[in-house]
Image: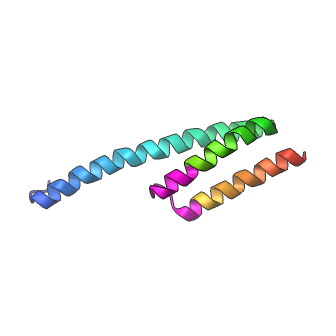
Amino acid sequence: MASHASALKKNRQDQKRRLRNRAHASKLRTQMKKITEAVSGSDPKAVAGLMQETVSLIDRTAKHRVIHRNAASRTKSRLAKALNKLQKA
């Protein structure tokens, strides 16, 4: 266990950040499950409705550096590709 005041403070900060990051990641995973389910359900309107909300959440999660910005970009690209494929079909 840390004994210096600065190390104790760093531990407290890390614990708060860990909880915050877990909450962001959990919210993102839940949203991704919803949109993935909508894509497999083949309903373009439902996917389009969830798309804006999901992209916004991905951007916010990347802004907080819970996920890497390139991972966020890749995820958004794959979602857009899936939506376009559904709309063409």
Q: Position of residue 85 (x, y in %)?
A: 83, 50
The image quadrant that residue 38 belongs to is: top right
Of the 4 image quadrants, the one containing the C terminus is top right
Q: Residue at x 21, y 57 (%)?
A: 10
Q: Main secondary structure of the magenta part?
A: helix
Q: Which residues are magenta?
A: 58-71
Scheme of image coloration: rainbow
Q: Residue furthest right?
A: 89
Side of 77 where 45 appears, left or right: right
- Relative to 56, does residue 73 appear above or below in the rendering? below
Pinpoint residue 55: horizontal percent, then vertical percent. 62, 49
Q: Nearer the viewer, residue 49 or 24?
A: 49
Q: Residue furthest bottom?
A: 70
Residue at x 51% of width, y 40% of height? 27
The reply to whether the magenta stretch includes residue 38 is no
Q: Position of residue 80 (x, y in %)?
A: 74, 53
Q: Is residue 43 above or below residue 19?
A: above
Numbered circles on residues, count = 0
Q: Residue at x 49, y 41 (%)?
A: 26
Q: Is residue 61 magenta?
A: yes
Which residue is rendered at x = 56% and y = 47% of the image?
57
The image shows residue 72 at horizontal and vertical percentages of: 58, 58
Where 73 falls versus 87 (above or below)?
below
